[in-house]
Image (cartoon, rainbow, N blue to C red):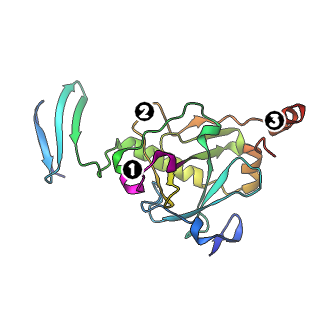
Amino acid sequence: MLVLARKVGQSIVISDNIEILVIEVRGDQVRLGIEAPRSIPVHRKELLEQIRAENLEAAAQTDVEAASQALGESPET
Amino acid sequence: MRVDTTRFGSIDVDDSAVITMPSGLIGFETCTRFCLIRHRAGENFQWLQSVEEPGLAFVVVDPAAYFDGYEIEISDSDVDRLGLVDAEDAVVFTIVTIRDGGASITANLAAPIVINSKNNIGAQVVLQNELYTTRHALIVRQAAQQTTTAKAA
Protein backbone atom coordinates (compact mmCIF):
# COMPACT_ATOMS: atom_id res chain seq x y z
CA MET A 1 0.00 0.00 0.00
CA LEU A 2 1.21 3.43 -0.92
CA VAL A 3 0.97 5.93 1.92
CA LEU A 4 1.05 9.65 1.17
CA ALA A 5 0.86 12.62 3.53
CA ARG A 6 -1.34 15.44 2.24
CA LYS A 7 -2.52 18.77 3.63
CA VAL A 8 -5.89 20.43 3.25
CA GLY A 9 -6.20 21.77 -0.27
CA GLN A 10 -3.72 19.27 -1.65
CA SER A 11 -4.75 16.36 -3.79
CA ILE A 12 -3.52 13.17 -5.32
CA VAL A 13 -3.99 12.11 -8.89
CA ILE A 14 -4.60 8.49 -9.84
CA SER A 15 -3.88 7.54 -13.41
CA ASP A 16 -4.64 10.53 -15.60
CA ASN A 17 -8.31 10.92 -14.81
CA ILE A 18 -8.98 10.60 -11.07
CA GLU A 19 -8.26 13.32 -8.57
CA ILE A 20 -8.83 13.13 -4.83
CA LEU A 21 -8.71 16.40 -2.95
CA VAL A 22 -8.46 16.80 0.82
CA ILE A 23 -11.14 19.39 1.57
CA GLU A 24 -11.21 19.46 5.35
CA VAL A 25 -9.75 17.67 8.34
CA ARG A 26 -11.58 17.87 11.64
CA GLY A 27 -10.56 15.53 14.45
CA ASP A 28 -10.62 12.02 13.05
CA GLN A 29 -12.81 12.98 10.11
CA VAL A 30 -11.59 13.81 6.66
CA ARG A 31 -13.71 15.27 3.87
CA LEU A 32 -12.57 14.33 0.43
CA GLY A 33 -13.55 15.62 -2.95
CA ILE A 34 -13.34 13.03 -5.69
CA GLU A 35 -13.27 13.79 -9.36
CA ALA A 36 -13.47 10.74 -11.56
CA PRO A 37 -14.93 9.81 -14.94
CA ARG A 38 -18.59 8.86 -14.80
CA SER A 39 -17.73 5.28 -15.67
CA ILE A 40 -15.94 4.82 -12.34
CA PRO A 41 -18.23 4.09 -9.39
CA VAL A 42 -17.21 5.59 -6.06
CA HIS A 43 -18.71 4.15 -2.87
CA ARG A 44 -18.12 4.09 0.85
CA LYS A 45 -16.56 0.71 1.59
CA GLU A 46 -18.67 -0.06 4.66
CA LEU A 47 -21.85 0.34 2.62
CA LEU A 48 -20.61 -2.20 0.09
CA GLU A 49 -19.80 -4.57 2.95
CA GLN A 50 -23.29 -4.12 4.40
CA ILE A 51 -24.85 -4.85 1.02
CA ARG A 52 -22.69 -7.93 0.59
CA ALA A 53 -23.74 -9.23 4.01
CA GLU A 54 -27.40 -8.48 3.30
CA ASN A 55 -27.24 -10.28 -0.05
CA LEU A 56 -25.69 -13.31 1.62
CA GLU A 57 -28.45 -13.39 4.20
CA ALA A 58 -31.20 -12.88 1.61
CA ALA A 59 -29.82 -15.73 -0.51
CA ALA A 60 -30.09 -18.08 2.46
CA GLN A 61 -33.89 -18.08 2.09
CA THR A 62 -34.34 -21.54 0.63
CA ASP A 63 -37.81 -22.37 1.91
CA VAL A 64 -40.25 -21.36 -0.81
CA GLU A 65 -43.35 -22.09 1.28
CA ALA A 66 -42.06 -20.09 4.23
CA ALA A 67 -41.46 -17.12 1.93
CA SER A 68 -44.98 -17.42 0.54
CA GLN A 69 -46.40 -17.46 4.05
CA ALA A 70 -44.29 -14.54 5.22
CA LEU A 71 -45.11 -12.28 2.29
CA GLY A 72 -48.68 -13.35 1.64
CA GLU A 73 -50.50 -12.95 -1.60
CA SER A 74 -51.37 -9.91 -3.61
CA PRO A 75 -54.79 -8.32 -3.30
CA GLU A 76 -55.62 -8.96 -6.96
CA THR A 77 -56.19 -12.69 -6.44
CA MET B 1 -33.72 -23.07 -22.11
CA ARG B 2 -33.82 -25.54 -19.25
CA VAL B 3 -32.80 -24.15 -15.88
CA ASP B 4 -32.02 -26.32 -12.88
CA THR B 5 -32.98 -24.86 -9.52
CA THR B 6 -32.84 -26.27 -6.03
CA ARG B 7 -36.07 -24.50 -5.01
CA PHE B 8 -38.27 -25.04 -8.05
CA GLY B 9 -36.79 -28.09 -9.71
CA SER B 10 -36.02 -28.00 -13.41
CA ILE B 11 -37.92 -25.23 -15.15
CA ASP B 12 -38.32 -23.85 -18.65
CA VAL B 13 -37.18 -20.28 -19.19
CA ASP B 14 -37.59 -18.42 -22.43
CA ASP B 15 -34.18 -17.30 -23.69
CA SER B 16 -35.54 -13.81 -24.19
CA ALA B 17 -36.47 -13.60 -20.51
CA VAL B 18 -32.92 -14.10 -19.28
CA ILE B 19 -31.54 -11.05 -17.50
CA THR B 20 -27.84 -10.43 -17.89
CA MET B 21 -26.14 -8.79 -14.95
CA PRO B 22 -22.53 -8.32 -16.08
CA SER B 23 -21.28 -7.50 -12.57
CA GLY B 24 -23.49 -10.04 -10.84
CA LEU B 25 -24.77 -9.10 -7.41
CA ILE B 26 -22.50 -7.73 -4.73
CA GLY B 27 -20.95 -10.79 -3.09
CA PHE B 28 -22.06 -12.98 -6.00
CA GLU B 29 -20.07 -11.44 -8.81
CA THR B 30 -19.58 -14.67 -10.75
CA CYS B 31 -23.28 -15.32 -11.39
CA THR B 32 -24.29 -13.04 -14.21
CA ARG B 33 -27.46 -14.50 -15.70
CA PHE B 34 -30.81 -14.60 -13.95
CA CYS B 35 -34.49 -15.10 -14.55
CA LEU B 36 -37.55 -13.98 -12.63
CA ILE B 37 -39.83 -16.66 -11.25
CA ARG B 38 -43.28 -16.08 -9.85
CA HIS B 39 -43.73 -19.28 -7.92
CA ARG B 40 -47.48 -18.97 -7.59
CA ALA B 41 -49.84 -16.81 -9.62
CA GLY B 42 -50.99 -13.85 -7.58
CA GLU B 43 -48.03 -13.75 -5.26
CA ASN B 44 -46.77 -10.24 -4.72
CA PHE B 45 -43.14 -11.20 -4.94
CA GLN B 46 -40.86 -13.00 -7.31
CA TRP B 47 -37.62 -14.92 -7.14
CA LEU B 48 -34.56 -13.65 -8.93
CA GLN B 49 -33.08 -17.02 -9.80
CA SER B 50 -29.59 -17.60 -11.10
CA VAL B 51 -29.59 -19.48 -14.39
CA GLU B 52 -26.09 -20.75 -13.71
CA GLU B 53 -26.17 -21.61 -10.02
CA PRO B 54 -29.20 -23.74 -9.07
CA GLY B 55 -29.04 -22.81 -5.40
CA LEU B 56 -28.85 -19.04 -5.84
CA ALA B 57 -32.11 -17.10 -5.69
CA PHE B 58 -33.37 -13.95 -4.04
CA VAL B 59 -36.85 -12.87 -3.04
CA VAL B 60 -37.57 -9.58 -4.80
CA VAL B 61 -40.51 -7.18 -4.68
CA ASP B 62 -41.61 -4.06 -6.48
CA PRO B 63 -40.60 -1.37 -3.95
CA ALA B 64 -43.42 0.92 -5.14
CA ALA B 65 -45.92 -1.54 -3.66
CA TYR B 66 -44.47 -1.12 -0.16
CA PHE B 67 -42.54 2.11 0.08
CA ASP B 68 -44.41 5.25 -0.84
CA GLY B 69 -42.14 7.90 -2.25
CA TYR B 70 -39.18 5.60 -2.78
CA GLU B 71 -37.11 7.34 -5.39
CA ILE B 72 -33.83 6.29 -6.78
CA GLU B 73 -31.27 8.33 -8.56
CA ILE B 74 -29.17 6.15 -10.81
CA SER B 75 -25.61 7.37 -11.18
CA ASP B 76 -24.12 8.14 -14.55
CA SER B 77 -21.85 5.12 -14.34
CA ASP B 78 -24.85 2.84 -13.72
CA VAL B 79 -26.86 4.46 -16.50
CA ASP B 80 -23.93 3.73 -18.77
CA ARG B 81 -23.49 0.10 -17.80
CA LEU B 82 -27.23 -0.56 -18.07
CA GLY B 83 -27.40 1.17 -21.42
CA LEU B 84 -30.39 3.14 -20.16
CA VAL B 85 -31.72 5.77 -22.51
CA ASP B 86 -35.15 6.39 -21.04
CA ALA B 87 -35.90 6.33 -17.31
CA GLU B 88 -39.20 4.60 -18.09
CA ASP B 89 -37.27 1.55 -19.27
CA ALA B 90 -35.82 0.99 -15.80
CA VAL B 91 -37.57 -1.76 -13.86
CA VAL B 92 -36.72 -1.65 -10.17
CA PHE B 93 -36.77 -4.51 -7.70
CA THR B 94 -35.82 -4.63 -4.07
CA ILE B 95 -34.25 -7.68 -2.44
CA VAL B 96 -36.10 -8.91 0.61
CA THR B 97 -34.57 -10.69 3.59
CA ILE B 98 -36.86 -12.87 5.68
CA ARG B 99 -35.60 -13.66 9.17
CA ASP B 100 -36.90 -15.73 12.05
CA GLY B 101 -39.49 -17.52 9.97
CA GLY B 102 -41.13 -14.29 8.85
CA ALA B 103 -41.07 -12.43 12.18
CA SER B 104 -38.73 -9.93 10.56
CA ILE B 105 -38.98 -8.98 6.90
CA THR B 106 -36.73 -6.25 5.56
CA ALA B 107 -36.06 -4.73 2.18
CA ASN B 108 -32.72 -3.51 0.93
CA LEU B 109 -33.52 -0.02 -0.33
CA ALA B 110 -29.87 0.99 -0.46
CA ALA B 111 -29.02 -1.35 -3.30
CA PRO B 112 -31.96 -2.10 -5.58
CA ILE B 113 -31.83 -4.29 -8.66
CA VAL B 114 -32.38 -2.19 -11.76
CA ILE B 115 -33.14 -3.86 -15.07
CA ASN B 116 -33.25 -2.12 -18.42
CA SER B 117 -36.38 -3.62 -19.97
CA LYS B 118 -35.15 -2.73 -23.44
CA ASN B 119 -32.08 -4.97 -23.37
CA ASN B 120 -32.60 -7.08 -20.22
CA ILE B 121 -29.34 -5.88 -18.73
CA GLY B 122 -29.46 -5.50 -14.98
CA ALA B 123 -27.31 -4.42 -12.09
CA GLN B 124 -27.43 -4.07 -8.36
CA VAL B 125 -27.23 -0.33 -8.05
CA VAL B 126 -25.67 1.26 -4.97
CA LEU B 127 -27.51 4.47 -4.16
CA GLN B 128 -25.73 7.53 -2.82
CA ASN B 129 -28.83 8.57 -0.83
CA GLU B 130 -27.91 7.84 2.79
CA LEU B 131 -31.56 7.85 3.87
CA TYR B 132 -31.91 4.41 2.37
CA THR B 133 -30.40 1.48 4.23
CA THR B 134 -30.06 -2.22 3.59
CA ARG B 135 -32.79 -3.03 6.12
CA HIS B 136 -36.12 -1.24 5.92
CA ALA B 137 -38.99 -3.03 7.65
CA LEU B 138 -41.40 -4.36 5.06
CA ILE B 139 -45.00 -4.36 6.21
CA VAL B 140 -47.06 -7.10 4.65
CA ARG B 141 -50.69 -6.25 4.11
CA GLN B 142 -52.76 -9.19 5.22
CA ALA B 143 -54.15 -11.10 2.27
CA ALA B 144 -57.34 -11.99 4.16
CA GLN B 145 -58.16 -8.33 4.85
CA GLN B 146 -57.49 -7.38 1.27
CA THR B 147 -59.82 -10.11 0.01
CA THR B 148 -62.56 -8.93 2.34
CA THR B 149 -62.12 -5.36 1.17
CA ALA B 150 -62.23 -6.47 -2.44
CA LYS B 151 -65.44 -8.40 -1.86
CA ALA B 152 -67.04 -5.49 -0.04
CA ALA B 153 -66.14 -3.22 -2.94
The residue lying at 59 percent from left, 65 percent from top is: B17
User: Residue B146: which numbered mark, if any?
Assistant: 3
Badge nearest the viewer, 3 or 1: 1
Can you give x and y, in whole percent of width and height, for residue A23 in the image?
18, 30
* B65 on left or right of A19: right
Say which amino acid is labelled 1.
Val
Q: Residues within 10 Å of mark 1 (few under 14, many from 20)?
A: many
Q: Residues within 10 Å of mark 2 (few under 14, many from 20)?
A: few
Residue A64 horizontal side relative to residue B25, left or right:
right
Answer with the quarter of the image where residue B108 lies.
Answer: top right
In the drawing, what numbered circle is on residue B79? 1
- Does residue A17 sit above or below B106 in this rendering? below
**What range of the chain is rendered magenta?**
B78-91
Instruction: Return the mark for residue B130.
Output: 2
Q: Is residue B64 magenta?
A: no
The percent coordinates of residue B46 (x first, y second) are 66, 53
Element carrying mark 2? loop
Kind of residue sitting beneath label 2: Glu
Residue B104 on image: x %, y % = 66, 38
Q: Which residue appears at 41% of the width and 41% of the height?
A: A47
* Residue B113 versus residue B121 in the image, above or below: above
